[in-house]
Amino acid sequence: MKILVLQGPNINMLGRRKAEHYGTVTMDEIHRHLEQKADELACEIVCFQSNYEGALVSKVQELRDSADGILINPAGLTTTSVSLRDALEDAGLPLVEIHLSNIHAREAWRRHSLFSEIAVGIIAGFRWRGYVSALDMLVGMLRDEERSVK
């Protein structure tokens, strides 16, 4: 089982920006936590971060036929990226939307996500732990679906 982990703009700056919202864990540390969880779950993850919307769209299109699901933190693209949303919807893969901070407890403009309607679930406010929980839940859901098909 392969899970694509997509990270949007500025996630590469974690650990150096707005610790009160995002914590002090870096993106690389999040990826290490995810790799450890993936090993426990016997699945593969592919982590990709870009500050460019088109690069994220291209990665979805590149892996849509080989991935089983997607974890995404659209970050600054949450409220604006129709093209990334369309690429994810076209891929037809189950996805979990992740936000490090609780977007519903922040500025009003952060509370609307273009991705929520196409997500099987949303995790917000648990900082880096949200990624690990999302991976655990998505893989569990996919395995449950595999068992029910057999």
Image: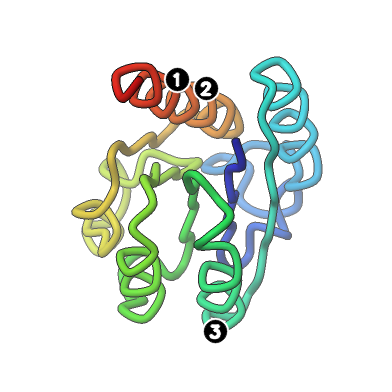
Q: CA distance from mark 1 to mark 3?
A: 30 Å
Above-or-below relation of 50 to 74: below
Mark 1 neighbour class, 10 Å CA radius: few under 14, some 14 to 19, many 20 or more? few
Q: CA distance from mark 2 to mark 1?
A: 6 Å
Residue 127's image quarter? top right
Q: Describe residue 92's horizontal placement relative to residue 136 as left or right.
A: left
Badges 1 and 3: C-beta atoms under 8 Å apart? no
Residue identified by numbered label 3: 54
Residue identified by numbered label 1: 140
Label 2 residue SS: helix
Mark 3 neighbour class, 10 Å CA radius: few under 14, some 14 to 19, many 20 or more? few
Q: Check the picture and name the quadrant holding the N terminus.
A: top right
Where residue 97 appears, as percent x and y from the top left, is: 39, 46
Where residue 142 appears, as percent x and y from the top left, is: 41, 29
Above-or-below relation of 21 to 109: above
Badges 2 and 1: C-beta atoms under 8 Å apart? yes
Q: Amino acid at mark 3?
A: Gly
The disc placed on residue 136 is 2
Label 1 residue SS: helix
Camera-side mark, 2 or 1? 1
